[in-house]
Image (cartoon, grey):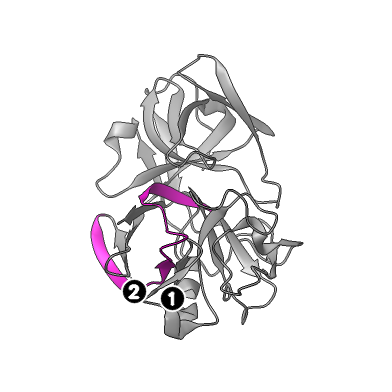
Amino acid sequence: MRRIPRGLPAGLRARRGGPQLLIAGLIVSGAVLSGCSSASTGETAPATRTTTTDPAAPQKVAKVVNTFESLPKGDSLVATATAAKVQIHRSPGGAVGKTLDNPLEIGGPLTFLVTGQKGNWLKVHLPIRPNGATGWIDGNQVKLSTTPYRVVVSMKKHRLDLFEEGRRTARYPVGVGKSTTPTPPGEYYLTELIRPSNPDGVYGPYAFGLSAFSETLKSFAGGPGQLGLHGTNEPDKVGTDVSHGCIRLTNDVISKLARTLPLGTPVQIEA
């Protein structure tokens, strides 16, 4: 991956990178993810996070993308912050509505899913409330990569479909939010990857953070109500409405996804 040159869309180089696995580092509260505990007390387990890339993860070759519109079918464009602070503009070069810190509070990189482009300005999905929030960022504050993967979750069917380059490559059962704490449908992306300190705990061995937030829990166990995609210590409940809003998978499946999916991978959640 390399820094975006000025003068887009004359040409930018984007790399398909392997997953940015967050392992063996800073101990923080797992309560950042709101729907990840099945305990009636709402207790959550501590998690371990850093920004080390897993050497076992498959690496993709570099690609040249002339414009956002020229992305190959099935690919998505991801922007990873290189600046300590990234300003979010309401329009290309317009007023600043918000400033986000990089890295994240827990140590991971600030990542965006790119949805549009105007010159050197990139329209991105934002990892903040409200769900579906977008803004514009200066391309000089990020580096670009592409991901061939896409995740589609059907809550009605309790199913996760994994796509690569537009083709479905796997299908897995999932647990979703209960009626009182439903999983909000929408277009999101993977923002971080957590390795819990207890792989046999409520999160399983890995938990992806999503750019989605609970619409019924404004906070949870001291966190902002962020939702996640994670393993579980109750595999018998996968395939049911069970969580506070998170998407639950069996531990073997979340381990496979952790070795496969880079941050920024789009996640579509359907009712």
18 within the magenta span: no
- In front: 189, or 133? 133
Judging by the rendered image, the residue that carries numbered circle 1 is 253
Direction from residue 168 to residue 234 in the image, left or right? right
* Residue drawn at the location 51% of the way across and 63% of the way down: 244
Relative to residue 16, is residue 88 drawn left or right? right
**Do residues under tags 1 and 2 come within 8 Å of each other at their CB atoms?**
yes
Residue 132 picture location, percent across and down: 42, 39
- Please, what is the three-letter code of the amino acid marked with disc 2? Tyr
Tag on residue 172? 2
Q: Where is residue 226 in the image (x, y as percent from the top left)?
A: 56, 52
Determine which of the numbered discs, if any, sits on residue 171 in the image. none
The quarter of the picture where the C terminus appears is: bottom left
Residue 29 horizontal/vertical position (percent):
72, 61
> Against 171, is 18 above or below?
above
Q: Earlier in the sequence, mark 1 or mark 2?
A: 2
Q: Is residue 9 above or below residue 260?
A: above
Q: Which amino acid does label 1 sit on?
A: Val
Dot 1 falls on a residue whose secondary structure is helix
- Residue range corresponding to the magenta coloring: 166-191
Q: What is the secondary structure assignment of the residue under circle 2?
A: strand
87 vs 144, nearest the viewer = 87
Would you say residue 167 sits in the magenta stretch? yes
* Residue 36 appears in view: yes
- Out of 198 and 270, give the one closest to the viewer: 270
Residue 42: which quarter of the image?
bottom right
